[in-house]
Amino acid sequence: MPETLPLLEVLRGAERYLADRGVENPRLNAEHLLAHALGLKRMELYLQFDRPLTEADRAPLRDLVKRRGAREPLQHVLGTAEFHGRTFACDKRGLVPRPETEQLVEFALEITKTKTSPRILDTGTGSGVIALTLALEIPSAGVHAADISPDALALAAENAARHELAARISFHQADLLPPGDTEFDLIIANLPYIPAGEIAALSPEVRQDPASALDGGPDGLDLIRRLIDTAPARLAAGGALLLEIGIGQADAVDAHLAARKFRDISVRPDYQNIPRFAVGFHG
């Protein structure tokens, strides 16, 4: 092996390795990994294709590429995920944030725009990206974040510290709703909604998310139904329950919201035109 190799050759080698192991978008993945190993922004690679990389330069990349080739999620390998234009710590303690969840946040911002100091609960917070993004976008908001998993809450707290929000977020280890009688203007949730029987068919990357963040029971709606049942007791008059849901679940969720006397119920599509976000108002 030569003492040095051009950056472009190293990049192409990593791309081939990932492609051979079934990784989607192998070139993009290789670019992210190489940029991370070299401490560069991904786009900076394009200005350095002829840069000679020594063995010492290439060694850190080798481990990263092997981990990604074993289908460890890219965000876990990098240790971070991008969400709504910000960087958050990401590892096996919480769900890898998905692009459609950014739309959930946009919907939440639209719902709360008329509130001066909205009280918001993000339940099933995982890594905390929803709660923290809303806190950053609405500086006057009182934000609570709940999760049943202490590991997920620890990750969320690390992300709060990362974004200097530790003093503004109230964290609760709780099964859906935190203890107390605080009423919220918005309860938002991206709860597990994958039917248990479909989990085995998910991609290897997704299956490395915590099982508790994926498994929604036989039809995927166990936790969603339970939150719809219990949320009214903690919603202020006019408060909203906003949910991210799975494919084919819109009619069932709409019906359950109606059965629990929510009003102005609507379901909105994601960027792929899949009904993905359900909202209902209380009182």
Image: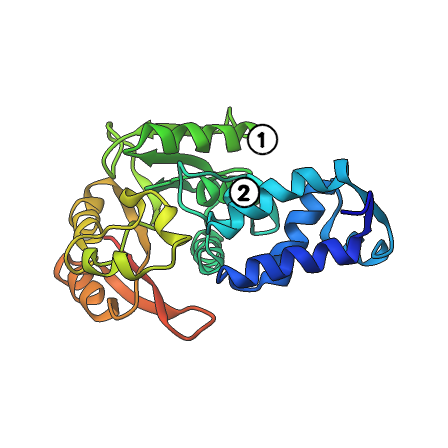
For the residue marked with disc 2, what is the amino acid?
Val
Give the class, few, some or many, for how many residues have Cα within 10 Å of label 1's Cα (few <14, many ≥20).
Answer: few
Label annotation for residue 77: 2
Q: Quadrant of residue 56?
A: top right
Evaluate whether residue 256 shows in this view: yes
Q: Nearer the viewer, residue 81 or 133?
A: 81
Q: Left or right: 5 with respect to 92?
A: right
Q: Are marks 1 and 2 in contact (CB under 8 Å)?
A: no
Label annotation for residue 89: none
Q: Nearer the viewer, residue 78 or 186?
A: 78
Q: Residue at x 43, y 54 (%)?
A: 108
Disc count in the image? 2
Residue 265 at x, y = what percent?
27, 65
Foreground: disc 1 or disc 2: 2
Evaluate whether residue 114 shows in this view: no
Q: Is residue 185 above or below residue 178?
A: below
Residue 75 at x, y = what percent?
53, 46
Which SS class for mark 1?
helix
Q: Residue at x 21, y 63 (%)?
A: 253
Q: Which residue is mark 1?
A: 162
Q: Nearer the viewer, residue 279 or 200?
A: 200
Q: Left or right: 185 with respect to 140?
A: left
Residue 99 at x, y = what percent?
49, 59
Residue 121 at x, y = what percent?
36, 40
Give the mark, 1 or 2, whose residue is nearer the N terminus.
Answer: 2
Q: Left or right: 129 with respect to 252?
A: right
Q: Residue at x 52, y 44 (%)?
A: 67
Q: Residue at x 35, y 51 (%)?
A: 207
Q: Which residue is farthest top?
A: 167
Give the class, few, some or many, for how many residues have Cα within 10 Å of label 2's Cα (few <14, many ≥20).
Answer: some
For the residue marked with disc 1, what is the amino acid?
Arg
